[in-house]
Amino acid sequence: MVKKLISALGLCLLGAFLFTNCPNPAMQQIDPKTTYSVRVFPPPQHGSITLSQERVQQGTNVFVYVNPDPGYVLLDGSLISQSEIDGNPSGIPKDGEKYQLSITQYNVAVTASFVPKVPGTYTVSVDPSLTHGKMYAYPLAAPSGTPVRLVLLPDAGYDLVPGSLTLEDGTPVSEVLPFGFTLPSRDVTVIVQFEEKGYEALLASADKYLNVGEYDTAASFYKEAYKKNQTDPKTILYSTFAELGGLLIDPDVRSTLSMTAGYEASFNAPGTIDGWMCDTEYVAAGGGTWYSNWPGVTYDTAAENKNPPLYVHTTHTTEDVVFPQISLRGSNFVTPFGDFHISQQKATRQKFFNILFWSLIASNPNGFNGLLEKVNRYVFGAQFEAIAARAASFPANARVPLNNRLKERFGLEDIYGSGPTEIGKAELDYIFANLRAVKAIFEYLTVYDWAIDLRPWLTSEIHVDDGLDQILHKIFSQAASNDKHKEYWKTPSTVANILPFKNSFLHVRDTKSMDRARVDFSKALQMANDSMAHWYGASSNFTAAAQAEHQWAKDGLAAAKTAFDGNGVFYFPKKLPKSEAGAVWPNEAAADYGLSVVEFFRPGALSLTNFFTTELGGRAPSLFKVKWYEDSSNSYAAVITDQYELVTASEPSGRDAIETNVNGTGNSAPYRIYSFEMNTAYIKQLFPKGFTQFGEKAPLYKVFPTIPLWPIRPTYFIGTNISALNLYYYYHWR
């Protein structure tokens, strides 16, 4: 239900960040921003270039609009940007039918060349004297009879003068969105006028653009309408959504979402709200529609040269369609060991999150403190709180029609039913309850120190499907050989930066963040429970089926609030119940786990020395060897026994000791798996239910929950190579 109820904007924020933090008092003062100029120079002949912005921050996307003179077309490859520092020209890529330039850290000049058209085609130009807005067309040259799409981009507070959209000979162009006309057998110029609008007209324009999925333009109108009327519930609701969209495409937030951190690894966070919404439709040259490229949409290479190019849908789930496209190629950030590449497979939700995980690792080789600070400052800082305050101003009993485009886009019919739907404070509160909970998670994580050298994780041999045990095995197996990672392991100082227990990883860093986390968790739970009370109350707009299917969520939130308010124990299952009638949230007896609220919010709860038994005064984890054998009577299936022994300093005798791989059963099984021992005494304080196997001591593979990113992989070392012994060596002999 969470994914269904949160708007596109809130959902994208939640989906992009699986773990995170919030404002630190020392971080509230935002540094002065350096802005860079973007200009057209030298001015091209036989055409013009218009820029969406001319003074921008680093990380801003500037759209470049090309307007050839009648009879001319853009020369392929001639639209370039050139830094005024290094002077190296580079091509400007397309984003749909717009050209998009991402500003890094230099002033930039943009130019292009226009050449005469190809015989048999006709050109489309835009009136160069247009004021108070921009307009662009596509295609810019085509045979007669081709559908031409027009996109109008009025300045803030302005919109189309009715009847002013025409061709140069006075032929009217339909003002029904999407704007467009059929190309006649001549070169044409499109003319339009914009005028300043009042509140009612701005709101009507906003609705008009939202109805056809032009979200950026609609957002600009809702924002302007709110400036003129800050009490109308509809304006409050939709301008709040617009401001959330603006937050997503804010340069600082995009930089944080992109996780670049100064490196050449990038999560391509969209630069427009349309890009986040994923469902923009266009009229194709041959009729029908075509779609912007997104997960669940595959590029048709056979149609590559069509104008516009064609895209075709492939099968996807309703939830997966909101995942942003990931493209990651990092160069030399594992210097001096070359490039690291992450494949772009997203066949499953698990692979998507694996790639996201590796993107985080690749972009933050010194740990995550810097990333958390950026999230605190930019994603959940003053701008977010201002948007939350606007949402909170929505009148308690007001109801606003839910735009049908949004209702269909997020499949809300199964919750609200078919036909017109009204929403209000309950929906807004539920969206911000989820966002505030994410903010609280970031605040919670800020309590701890996440500084650690992650470069040994960046090996080209690590694959997106690897489990944690496979990854550790590769890292420590390679560390002993003459390979590209040997340099990281040959000095004590390097090892101390890399290995937890030898550094400050997960030590307490900021106790005040814990207080803020508790406050925001409390707010989030209160808001979510209030929303649930509405949806299950006398004035509910939920269908009976939706209430039956999501009763478990209501009960789960109520249980969380009760435990939180009373410093009690929150009981939860291994997996969330399915959204279906009859699904229930487990009580204490039926739950798999129970989390102590008091322990969880005690600074230092996540310290590694709490979770593992240690040696050398807490500077090294205890290592155990576990008996394992193949069952010849059952297709040689792996059998992991509950027999294990402590590895001591005298055993193994030297780094190269390897257990013999022989068959056996019971006591004759070889020790072929290595595992840390968990501090079950503390774990049972933090989790009063769920960690009681084998008494007070048990090896990792029996008690530690599977790492969520790789649910099919257990979290222990494979011991037939020397990877686990290498790790033991680095802790004890270095």
Image: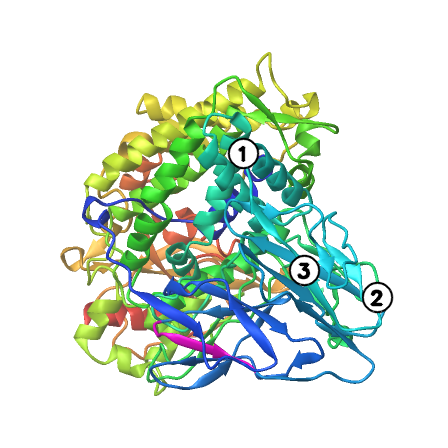
Is the residue marked by circle 2 packed among few (<14), some (14-19), or many (20+) residues within 10 Å?
few
Label 3 element class? strand
Location of residue 311 with respect to 484 vertically, above or below:
above
Residue corresponding to mark 2: 286
Which quadrant is home to the N terminus?
top right
- Check residue 106 for magenta coloring: yes
Which quadrant is home to the C terminus?
bottom left
- Quadrant of residue 477 in the image? bottom left
Image-based side of 225 in relation to 716, left or right: right
Label 1 element class? helix
Q: Which mark is residue 199?
A: 1
Front-lying residue, 50 or 329: 50
Amino acid marked by disc 2: Gly
Amino acid marked by disc 3: Ile
Over which residues does the magenta segment extend? 105-112
Q: Position of residue 608 (x, y in %)?
A: 26, 51
